[in-house]
Amino acid sequence: MSARPRSRAARAGLAVVAGALLAAGGVVPAGAEPAPSAMENIVPAPESVTPDPAAEFALSERTAILAPGEAAEVGEYLAGVLRPSTGFPVPVNPALPDPALPGTGDIALALDGDPALGPEGYRLQVADDAVRVRATSPDGLFNAVQTLRQLLPASIESATAQPGPWTVPGGEITDKPRFGHRSAQLDPARHFFTVDMVKRYIDQIAKYKINRLHLHLTDDQGWRLQINSWPRLTKVGGRTEVGGTPGGFYTQQDYSEIVDYAASRHMTVIPEIDMPGHTNAALTSYAELNCDGVAPPPYTGIDVGFSSLCVNKDVTYRFVEDVIREVAALTPGPYLHIGGDEAHSTTDEDYVAFMSKVLPLVEKYGKKPLGWHEYGKAAPKGDAALQFWGTTNGDPLLDEAVTRGNKVLASPANKSYMDMKYDENTPLGLEWAGFIEVADAYGWDPADHLGVPEESVLGVEAPMFSETLETSQHIEFMAFPRLPAIAELGWSPKRSLNWESFRGRLAAQGPRWQAAGQDFYRSPQIPWAP
């Protein structure tokens, strides 16, 4: 996927859920709205919230986490969240005979939840004497932990000890996701991001119940994943990035470290190897992949559509199979993203011929194909998925895909692209898909925006390409506060999607980001605390 700097889509108008109008100039007057209660302040909005004003739980030095069996891993994660800021020991007890009966002041995690809530749902009950969390899987417990941390004071996100007190408002939350696939994308191809930078972003997006990380690992400007059978891909293709600064790459051990870290945050990595276009880094590395046998020079600009693998050469498919085999072996998740967008240097006939050979290779190595929606031209089988990145409200390729049984991943560029500028004054980002303020990111419904049935929507994604992004601060500034908007569209029930409610709840996230040392854009649409 790309910057597409040579096209300029019409800028989307402001679409606001619930039809609420912003104050003049988009600026919210200070004190214009009362802050919602803490139990009702969660992002993404839970399915059901029942506050109990008479109850309040308090963490103390005696608080333990009771997490038997498979719940122990989530218990250790929760303890890791609580210990730095509280200074409390927060032991994790994995050997409790009855997790439904915690001691006074304890937090109990149990895998005896209601099957109707599914594998990611949970029930969280807060009383004076204990916090009880029930789910059917560790995924559900992990999601409950993200809710629980938002019920605690914002300073719980600090990496150093804070004074407290550490209270949780009483009540009950019952919750489950609307869509099972809730993704964020990161692009280390145009500007390289280190393993630690990727881990930092994983931690940040996990707080909003994002459960997929799409890594755009290859493009014209750089090849970022070591492929043992084609070592020049990283030795040559990994040396550059946008602007001509030194690039970098992930060894296979690095990549596995990212995959494992994501899994520890209950997140699945989806690797993308873009083809047949967006391949100049590969073409530079191996001259035989070019139709004329001549390697082009490295590319450090941001134009698109000029590169292509040579569709008519046998070596192309040996190359593609080797790459798919190695990437699939490193990736436990079900999908392998094959790109497929903006292959302007490839005729439609050659494109379809290329994909007809590549798609069986993805399946041969045990993965389901996922690609940008253009690859629908090749009529992938029913277990494949198309990712829509356009700026329209649908596409004939999506209609055909749904008829075949394909799923559609919704990431309309004029709504969900985190690398678009907020407005004309934004110092980072691009604007080919229009400006995207928080209300734009929130003001659409994945179930009807693309004109396909809701049951055909795999989920949502917030892509973020890196033509102008080089640091973690840049990533954070562009992702927040818009990433939580996309996360809520993917998680919360349709009836809960309300702009006025969301902007108030989003405002409460600001102090949390500040406590965590995380950057974000102070959108004038949100009533941030002074």
Image: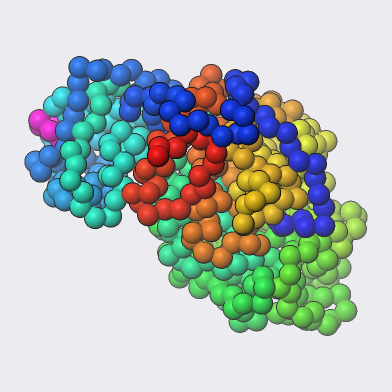
Which residue is located at x 89 percent, y 54 percent?
348
Horizontal side of 96 relative to 315 (left or right) equals left
Which residue is located at x 24 percent, y 23 percent?
170
Which residue is located at x 71 percent, y 73 percent?
300
Give how far across and how far down residue 224 sits, in percent.
59, 70
Give how far across and how far down residue 54 sits, in percent.
20, 17
Give how far across and how far down residue 218 sits, in percent.
65, 65
Horizontal side of 177 relative to 80 (left or right) equals right
- Numbered range of the magenta stretch: 101-107
Q: Is residue 435 visible?
A: yes
Horizontal side of 369 relative to 530 (left or right) equals right
In the picture shown, does residue 463 fall above or below 114? below
Which residue is located at x 24 percent, y 55 percent?
160
> Observer-nearest residue: 283 or 52?
52
Give how far across and how far down residue 411 sits, in percent.
66, 42
In the picture shown, does residue 286 fall above or below 330? below
Residue 255 among those drawn in magenta: no
Residue 104 in which image quadrant: top left
Number of marks in picture? 0
In the picture shown, does residue 16 fall above or below 89? above
> Observer-nearest residue: 123 or 36?
36
Q: What quarter of the picture does the C terminus occupy?
A: top left
Horizontal side of 359 relative to 143 (left or right) equals right
What predominant SS class does the magenta segment belong to? loop
Q: What quarter of the picture does the N terminus occupy?
A: bottom right
Q: Is residue 180 visible?
A: no
| Image coloring type | rainbow
